Image (cartoon, rainbow, N blue to C red):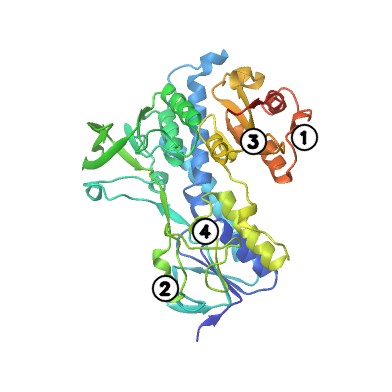
Amino acid sequence: MPRRFDAIVIGAGQSGPSLAARLAQEGQTVALIEREHLGGTCVNDGCIPTKTLVASARVAHLARRAADYGVQVDGAVRVDMKAVKARKDAVVQQSIDSLTTWLEGTPGLTLFRGEGAFSGDHQVTVNGEALTAPKVFINTGGRPVVPDWPGLADISYLTNTSMMDLDVLPEHLIIAGGSYIGLEFAQMYRRFGSRVTVLEYGDRLIGREDPEISETVKTILEAEGIEVRLGVRDFAVSGTAGAIRLNATAAGAPIVVDGSHLLLAIGRKPNVEALNLDAAGIALDPRGYIAVDDELRTNVEGIWAIGDVNGRGAFTHTSYNDYEIVAGDLLDGDDRKVSDRIQAYALFIDPPLARIGMSESDVRKSGRAALKGYLPMTRVGRARERGETQGFMQVLIDAETKLVLGAALLCIEADEVVHSLLDVMYARAPYTVVQRAVHIHPTVSELIPTMLGDLKPLT
């Protein structure tokens, strides 16, 4: 007979543990299944480790710029990659230990270490043991896409996961993919001291962004010595460890790039194959993600999909919000929906890009009358004081309702400053609330009202 629980959570990524603990705190018996690492991508090879590495890279970058600030550093700046990795590992381990203590100490929650797969209707098997529950939550996340390029299977390559094990400085890091993950690693390793080449399939970096943003990011990275090649197609790979040759075409002409390491950063895909979804009759959407409705329910009654596996968001914060939606609907009597969520994310290069709501392209396609505010960072005192005047701030306003439609901040502290606009969007308050606010000087945020006071029609 299967072992019975009130709820089964498959996967201990960002939303799974929070939901499992909350259900257990409500007096339910919960099985939490994890095949590899507690915390999922964010804790183990995503947000926490990469931003820890970014911090080390920024220190190296500022040390090289010390003279710009009147500070003398004797000798060359050297980066000890083994020490950098050890620091990253320690930060990650602290998060894992905290998460493990919390989950293992939660009454009513049983943690199963192994791979869970459906073996029937509301039945999941892990390590040969069958579990059953009226409520099942799938939180299995995603993984890097590995293409079928000729020769790739015969060489050693890196993904964002295996990069976390690297404790040497690549002589020349080739990065296939000019989007969010690839660009963060590009700047990071260039600052550590590697030669870096980014090869992007599209005709510009981070193709979902407006062209001005893509071009400004490219300029920032190239100014640090990163080589960027666009329109790269027809990849083929050869070589041995430490000596990799990538043959391709760029703008129709053949190119050859020789490097010591190759990082694949061309996208991610959902972890669904091992789940045996057919046994439970769970449907996928056309992109291969688990299909869910606005409350994250699958087509099978009593089964939900949360986090990256449902394709409704690809970020830690959207995954956690999935938990909040499900918990609110099931336990708090709320009426929460995915469609209530405003798009918000960041690219953590330096300076960071923070994006909320609609892009300028989105607004133009909508056909609505809109206003645009724009401010170059050369006009921001905090940026000049810090010697970091790259980028700009931009906001889009509905001309009729005065509501904020979206914003793009590519500047120092953008990932924090942007929330002053995001919170107003959630409040559905007019932009004049922010425009008339008195902000602290000298900060980046104080220039948001200035920008909003100089709106122009979007033409």
Instruction: Indicate the position of residue 70 as horizontal and vertical percent values.
Output: 57, 12
| Amino acid residing under circle 4 | Leu
Furthest-bottom residue in this view: 1
Q: Residue at x 30, y 36 (%)?
A: 232
Q: Which residue is mark 1?
A: 433
| Amino acid residing under circle 3 | Val
Front residue of 455 and 256? 455
Q: Which label's residue is closer to the chain start, 2 or 4?
A: 4
Q: Which residue is mark 3?
A: 418
Q: Residue at x 72, y 36 (%)?
A: 402
Q: CA distance from mark 4 to mark 1?
A: 42 Å
88 left or right of 248? right
Q: Which residue is mark 2?
A: 278
Instruction: Indicate the position of residue 137 as horizontal and vertical percent values.
Output: 55, 67
* Residue 412 picture quarter: top right
Furthest-top residue in this view: 70
Q: Which residue is mark 4?
A: 38
Q: CA distance from mark 3 to mark 1?
A: 15 Å
Q: Are marks 4 and 1 in contact (CB under 8 Å)?
A: no
| On screen, residue 446 above or below 121 | above
| On screen, residue 224 above or below 126 | above
